[in-house]
Image (cartoon, rainbow, N blue to C red):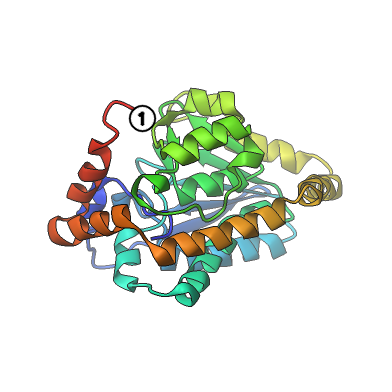
Amino acid sequence: MPCPYILAVLNQPEQQTAMAEPVIKTRVDGRVGVITFNRPDVLNAFNGALVEQVNQAMADFTRDESVLAIVVHGEGRAFSAGFDLKESALRNTTGTDQWRRLLEIDFDFIMQFWDCPKPTVAAVHGFCLAGAFELALCCDITVAAAGTRFGEPEARFGSGIICMLLPYATSPKFAKELLLTGNDRVDAERAHLMGIVNHVVPEGQHLDRAMELARDLCAAAPLSVQLTKRAINRSFDMMGLRQALLAALDVDVIIESTGGAERQEFNRIRREQGLKAALAWRDAKFAGKA
């Protein structure tokens, strides 16, 4: 499934309340638009409702001339563990065409933080994995709390990468190590060394630091900031970034629609024994090596 990794907590049902909590929260703080992922019981896993509402919030903040920067962060114990495995399983997606439609939606959801004309800042903590890891990479600036864990575990059970921006954010050596091993326990300090995050701050201070940076962005001349961001992004496009990302998405369509022995076994265990057992099966092969 797209970025199919969520911790074992997702094997538990979400708490039901008389009035359902919104899956995201938005607010404007001065000239900063703030988006908060609000599915803390499932580590802010990206489901369809969250994707749609974030898309709308990003569009609203982009149109709002009073907003000059956007900060995204997660409620509870994590930034996000990636796309929702439980919802993905219920879709029962089959065939190349269905997979392409689904993955293109997920790709556009992630890339809007890169393409947004206004600067974007990710404040991450806890877990920042798979699709959430890619989203944080797409933000212009990323602040991480000490103790944050990063990674993309897709290769460990036969899945692929939706938005392969990592080779552009760090060196080919680091990108290959992370993506080919599926390491999902990269700590914040090593992520900083790799160039994946801009700042590492004490636990609990990530949002405050992100807001400080966002206010600095807002204090600069808006036209200069937005056109300079566009120029930087265009320089990557001239190096072939967009074509490379779309080519990688084509590969992911093939991976997801074809599957493989590892994927089949993972899905079998998940169906028969639950997600926690499937993750334990996957991790047993890599115990002590991540």
In the rendering, at what x and y percent does residue 48 appear?
42, 67
State whether residue 278 is above or below residue 186: below
Q: Image quarter for residue 199?
A: top right
Q: Residue at x 25, y 54 (%)?
A: 266
Outermost residue toward the left in this view = 273
Q: Quadrant of the C terminus?
A: top left
Q: Count of labels shown?
A: 1
In the rendering, at what x and y percent does residue 39 appear?
36, 55
Q: Residue at x 34, y 72 (%)?
A: 91
In the rendering, at what x and y percent does residue 158 appear?
37, 52
Which one is nearer the viewer's eye here, 240 or 46?
240
Whether residue 46 can be seen here: yes
In the rendering, at what x and y percent does residue 108 appear?
59, 63
Outermost residue toward the front in this view = 261
Which one is nearer the viewer's eye here, 216 or 91?
91
State whether residue 100 is above or below residue 185: below
Whether residue 209 can be seen here: no
State whether residue 154 is above or below residue 62: above
Label 1 sits on a secondary structure element that is loop
173 sits to left or right of 41: right
Q: Quadrant of the N terminus?
A: bottom left
Q: Residues within 10 Å of mark 1 (few under 14, many from 20)?
A: few
Which one is nearer the viewer's eye here, 36 or 252?
252
The amino acid type of the residue labelled 1 equals Ala
15 sits to left or right of 92: left
116 sits to left or right of 50: right
Residue holding disc 1: 290
266 sits to left or right of 28: left
Q: Residue at x 64, y 55 (%)?
A: 245
Q: Residue at x 59, y 37 (%)?
A: 142
